[in-house]
Image: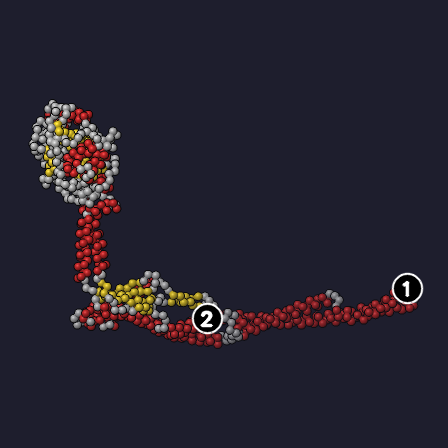
Amino acid sequence: MASPGTVGPTNLTVQKPDQRRDLAPAPQESGYGSYGSTAAEGRELSLSLLWRIAVEWRWLILAAIGTSIAAAVLITLLTPLKYRSTASLELNPPEVEIMTDEGSKGGRQSSARNDTNFVGTQLALLGSRALAERVAQNLNLAADPAIVGENTDRAANTATAASFVQGGTQVRLQPQSMIVRVSFVARDPQIAAKIVNGVTDAYIATNLERRYQSSSYARDFLQRQIATTRRDLERSERQLTTYAQQQRLISTGSSEDGGDTNSLTGSSLVSLNTALAATQARRIAAEQKYREAALGGATTEGSTNAAPLRAQIAALDAEYQQKRQTFRPDYPEMVALKARIDALRAAVVTETRTTNSDRIGTLRQDFQAARAEEDRLRAQVSGLSGTVLDQRGRLIQYNILKRDVDTNRTLYDALLQRYKEIGVAGGIGTAVASVVDRGLVPGAFSPNLYLNLMIGAVLGLVIGMLAAIALEFINDTIKSPDDIRDKLQLPFLGGIPTAKSAKPIEELRDTLSPLAEAYLSTASAMQFVTEGGAPKTLLVTSTRPAEGKSTSAWALAYSFTRLGKSVLLIDADMRRPAFVTGRENVGLSHILTNTGSLSEHVLQTDIDALWVMPSGIIPPSPPELIASARFAALLADASATFDVVVIDGPPILGLADSPLLSSIVQATLMVIESGRTRTRAAIEAQNRMRTAGAHMVGAILTRYQPQASYGYGYGYGYGQNKDQYRYVADGNEKKRRIMLTMHDEP
């Protein structure tokens, strides 16, 4: 290629972009994404999104807070002073009696009732209208003009005063206690203290009256019941006595079982049965002794009478045995001794028989007497048994009447005991509530300026945040790197801040400026979009006009030269060119319509390793030139000559140029103006490029600064100047210009 001419000093004027929050770029896989799903995902509220919204709409939020604070101050100044007096009451739950089974007559135990229903009832009574009416009457509030006005209707004034008391009374139970705080709010501190004390006094008095009325009713009721029960007891006793007289029933005891032994006949029958049993035992014993004697058994009495004779026989027998050793049995003395012994033995036998005969006769007489007595008593028992059985039937009715008497007597005694208890305890028991602290004359508590200011600030913050969130969601534009990643599904390659001067080209030449650093960071990120490093051919385009694509194309080309690459910048926007020259035979449109070499239409700038190919004259049909084989060959020749070829293409929407260019180049970069490019438009443009086969490597945000916000609106027009390259920004006629010094080829 022949040596290109030199392009002279450059003067670049850049429109100030919107300031947006700078987020570090993070590579992300690119791909198709529908507008509905990606936008919805991007709209999910998160802490980071809320923080970004708060920063972007900080002035709106601060204005809302300021307005709310001013309103709070105004309300505080216009609100009349209010006074609150507070009194404390201690609730005393009533004791209930629990019946127990201790002892035969039962027992009672007292137990305090801690029932939430009781507490709720007392709180409702404190705030009731009946109590308010009593307070109004006790304090004569119906005659106070400050409360009821100048009305002369006593009934209406009383109702008004009661409503005033009820409306200003506040009742609150202290947590974990039985202490109730009663407060009253009024514009007069004296009235507030008087009414709150009147409420507590009326409440206690009402409870005492209700308790007394309840006791009085109970006493009257018990008196009537006692009189009725006494009459029933007297009637039942008379019936019992009359029946006993008629049936001639005489009771001998106070046994409660109602047996037959309480009557005289029953007592006689019991005695006869006892005597019969004893006589029967005697008869059995006599009969046994008689039968034993009749069988001939030896008796103790017979043996006793014959004992002397047996002693003599024993002595004579001993003597006989002794003499036998000396004399023979037939010896006269021995014979006489033997005869004496035999006589004594015969006497013993006779004595024994006589004794046994006498004893048997005596036992027979005893047996016969016992049997006769038994028969007599058995006959008497048999006779009384019929009488007792007849009497038992009559005792059944007697016992029925007696139980009726006992029941009436027990009921009568219980009623008397209860009546005594009520008479003693009525009106003396523990009160339902007692005053702990009486209400004092208070100081003003409302309006509270500091509280109102705090509420106003919080309310303003909430309103401001809600308004900011609503505006944020209504303003559906690409604003942040997160929007690029979430809504467009593209990698974010760089955020370009707002230029500080009216000539961005001069700021770009300052290598330490934020603008130059941002573009250099983007060019560095481009080194990693392909496996071979930076793409050989890069199309820089945008969704709509005036998004900063031409400035970005020039700045990226310049940044690539800072990275040591030779760069060719081609102005392919042949409808509204950004780089124009007065020479009609130089430029992209001329080389595509004529036979010429690349070197003839490339101009060198005053920046080393940076060449520019202007668009040339505006052709009648730019898409036809871009779609021609001549353009593809030109692009191949340029990529073989230069390290990087940067193509400044026209906007995507409404034109066919950029989709055609994207199908030829190696990579496509979208330039998006922060806060002004609509999400739907950006997605539609991206889809058009992908349909054409574009390789979308990412997107950059121009006019992007943290904490910056601008409105909507854009314009696009075509124009050219034969004397100089000129880039027209938008409908506001703000212009950016690149002044290039032309040098002919050597």
431 relative to 680 in the view: left or right: right
**Vertical comparison of 344 with 461: above or below:** below
520 relative to 729 in the view: left or right: right
Identify the image quadrant of residue 656.
Answer: top left
Placement of the C terminus among the 4 image quadrants: top left
Instruction: Report which residue position mark 2 lands on.
Output: 403
* Residue at (21% x, 58% y) in the render: 452
Pick the front one: 394 or 39? 39
Callout 2: SS: helix
Callout 1: SS: loop
Identify the image quadrant of residue 704.
Answer: top left
Instruction: Report which residue position mark 1 lands on.
Output: 325
x, y percentage for residue 40?
Answer: 23, 42
Instruction: Report, in whole angstroms, how far the alpha carbon at label 2 lies from the one at label 1.
Output: 98 Å
Q: Is residue 289 visible?
A: yes
Q: Along the polypeptide, which appears first: circle 2 or circle 1?
A: 1
739 relative to 421 in the view: left or right: left
* Residue at (18% x, 43% y) in the render: 19
Q: Amino acid at mark 2?
A: Arg
Q: Amino acid at mark 1?
A: Gln
Dot 2 surroundings within 10 Å: few (below 14), some, or many (20 or more)? Answer: some
Q: How is the image coloured?
A: secondary structure
* Residue at (15% x, 24% y) in the render: 1
